[in-house]
Amino acid sequence: ASWIVRAVSRLPGQYKRSKMPEDDAPATEDQELNTPEEKEAWLRAHGVEIESAEDRRKKAEAAAAATHPLDHVEGVTRRVKYVRIPADDSEPFEQLEVILAHDAAGDQLPDILRPRFIGGGAINEKMAREQAIWQLGENGAALTGAALENASAQGSTETFALVRPSSTNGNTGVYLYLDEVGMLKGLAPNSRAVGLARDCGFDGVQFYGDMFVGRVQAEPSPMRNVDFAVADISVGSEWLRAAASENYRYNQSMSELQAAMKDKGGMTTIGFGEGSGDGEMPKGEGDGYRWSQTDDEVEVVVDAGEGTKAKDVWAMFRPDHVKVVVNGETKFEVGGDKPPGLFRKVRPDDCTWTIEKGKVVVTLQKTDEQLWHDLVAVP
């Protein structure tokens, strides 16, 4: 069941009951209760506090709202528009707005939207474990129901780049924001979001549950959220007309980069940490890896072992979490179960990896051009 029972107090073998009028008396003790709703109603009637997934979602939304100004103050805060795409095709697109600090840097929507993805259905443990085993090998079998329940209870936002910032589009990017475990919760497919991705050149993708669309401006630095309106989803929108060609050029450039890395050994095509004199950027090394950086990227070179092929490698990217698994063995991880996480957040959709001569070369895309003083955040 998706609800959690929290007894006000508990006596041996029974829940404490509140006094009730006779005409509102609860069901008899031997009444059969078949559905979660019936059980919840019975427990409420017996004086037990119930916290449902919907209750948790509302509390989280209230807490998130409390972290942001409730009123717009000119020069102190700014309003930013974004759009909800309901999974139910009968519902119209919804124009939403958030109030951010005037100097808020980076993409704020993943954190703002996280409460929206709390609850929403029980995760299919069998499907989740199969996916974990496919991605992580034998390590995936250790995935527990408690971990899955926690992922659902906390909420988690995944981003999908419809178009990335570039010099040809005014350095603006448009992103979808979705429930990271929406498919595992059995949420309804979102056909309009799928269609929008298809219009941007992405065939074969599937999305589940309500989704959101927002825009970021990468230049001038730092990156920040900017308006995205319902009207921007129309087929006549300039960004949408250009999205497919933009993504084609991006994929082409990534292919050329990987080819260049292969030709030159993979370690010298991107010049990290090669500054001169006192201007050299921070870099370092750890157990089985070394890292370096440029203004907009961080490179991590992980020892994978001679003979390692691309099919042996799985990498996971989150805003403050990166993990590299080789043949089912975790070779490198920062964040997740190994806090405190990366020094600064990254853009998961723009992170990549390649395999060269027994090394996994991970490229993390910074959210801004801030200098990283270390790879790992200060606890």
Image (cartoon, helix red, strand yellow):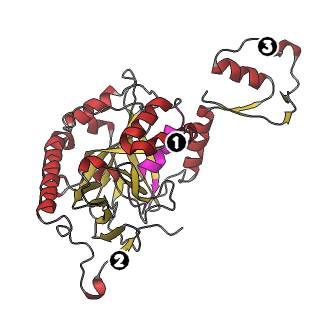
Question: Magenta segment, which residues?
Answer: 100-120
User: Dot 2: what SS?
Assistant: loop
Q: CA distance from mark 2 to mark 1?
A: 34 Å
Q: Nearer the viewer, mark 1 or mark 3?
A: 1
x and y percent of residue 168 in the render? Answer: 15, 54
Of marks 1 and 3, which one's residue comes earlier in the chain?
Answer: 3
Relative vertical location of residue 118 with respect to residue 324 in this rendering, above or below: above
In the image: residue 247, left or right of residue 375: left
Which residue carries the number 3 mark?
27
Which numbered marker is on residue 282? Answer: 2
Q: CA distance from mark 2 to mark 3?
A: 68 Å
x and y percent of residue 73 in the render? Answer: 49, 57
Which numbered marker is on residue 151? Answer: 1
Amino acid type indicated by mark 3? Ala
Is mark 1 in CB contact (under 8 Å) with mark 3?
Answer: no
The picture quadrant where one finds residue 270 is: bottom left
x and y percent of residue 5 in the render? Answer: 71, 32
Q: Quadrant of the C terminus?
A: bottom right
Residue 111 located within the stretch drawn in magenta:
yes
